[in-house]
Image (cartoon, helix red, strand yellow):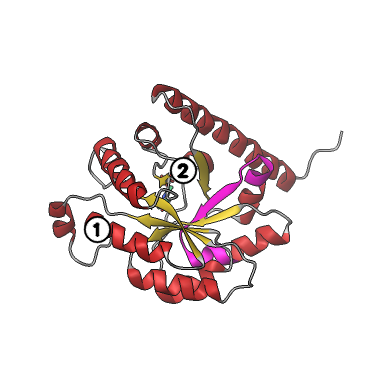
Amino acid sequence: MSPQPANETEAGDRAAELARNLARVQERITAAVAAAGRTERPGLIVVTKFHPASDVLDLVRLGVTDVGENREQEAGPKAAEVAAAGAHPRWHFIGQLQSNKAARVLRFANEVHSVDRPGLVTALEKAAARREADTEAVGCYLQVDLRSAADREAAGAASRGGVLPQEMLSLAEQVASAEHLALRGLMAVAPLGEDPAPAFERLAALSHSLREVHPEAVEISAGMSQDLEQAVAAGATRLRIGTEVLGPRPTVG
Ligand SMILES: *Cc1c(COP(=O)(O)O)cnc(C)c1O
């Protein structure tokens, strides 16, 4: 029997590792859904930032339909490589987004989870309107800042964590009235150094107020590798999981 070339073995090992990790995450989600007494399972977005297009292709083969990225410079070429290989997952943009990058992000992203200010909505609508006429509307999640006023103050004015809760409804109105954007719901990251459970409960309450005005905006994008159980308990409909599926990200240096 001739030995397999090393690179093929490595590729097979990686696919097997991703399959194992994915199965473990799915088990965690199943357990969390059961513990919360929920009937509907939240959708899984696998966050592939820092990991190569080959991992995205393996994930698609394993049945993953949705992937998340947070940097346009990295995600654009990766999405192009994945599409060239014939795979077409839905791409979710989950990182901070400068208005002048909106058009570049919309070249690949189907959904944007980090909509946090009026200027960005204007830029997204303008870029979306320039795309081909039959392109689907851009799914928009309003990223809300779940930090307490005191923590926000301590972090300084430059730290943006999303739209302030009291400004959520006016931002929602702007997205809902934009022809090429579709208001999906809310997104949040649990504040650092705080128990995620009460933070996600605040998010659930905000989602409730949002749905009173925009009944279609049902999505709650919350829950990462460390806090998916708390997010599921609070009603998350979309989980954004990176490390638990792909392993640690290389540190940026
Ligand atoms: C990186 C990232 C995730 C995934 O985080 P993990 O801890 O690796 O699961 C989720 N949401 C956002 C906004 C991220 O930037």
Q: Is residue 25 visible?
A: yes
Query: Who's the residue at 42% across and 39% down the image?
Result: 225
- Where does label 1 land, which residue? 164
Query: Who's the residue at 28% across and 42% down the image?
Result: 205
In this view of the protein, which residue sits in the foreground, 185 or 155? 185
Q: Does the beta carbon of the residue at mark 2 sit less than 8 Å from ligand 1?
A: no
Left or right: residue 55 compared with residue 153: right
In this view of the protein, which residue sits in the foreground, 19 or 112? 112
Specify which label sits upstream in the sequence, 2 or 1: 1
Task: Report if residue 248 lies within the magenta region.
Answer: no
In this view of the protein, which residue sits in the foreground, 174 or 104? 174
- Where does label 2 land, which residue? 238
Instruction: Indicate the quadrant containing the C terminus: top left, top right, bottom left or bottom right.
Output: bottom left
- The local secondary structure at tag 2 comes to strand
Left or right: residue 123 compared with residue 13: left
Q: Position of residue 211 (x, y in %)?
A: 36, 47
Q: Position of residue 132 (x, y in %)?
A: 64, 72
Left or right: residue 245 compared with residue 37: right
Q: Which residues are magenta?
A: 58-76
The correct choice, above or below, for 156 with respect to 148 in the image is below
Q: Residues within 10 Å of mark 2 (few under 14, many from 20)?
A: many
User: Marks 2 and 1, how far apart in space?
Assistant: 21 Å
Numbered circles on residues, count = 2
Q: Is residue 98 visible?
A: no
The correct choice, above or below, for 99 with respect to 168 in the image is below
Three-letter amino acid code at disc 2? Arg
Q: Position of residue 162 (x, y in %)?
A: 30, 58
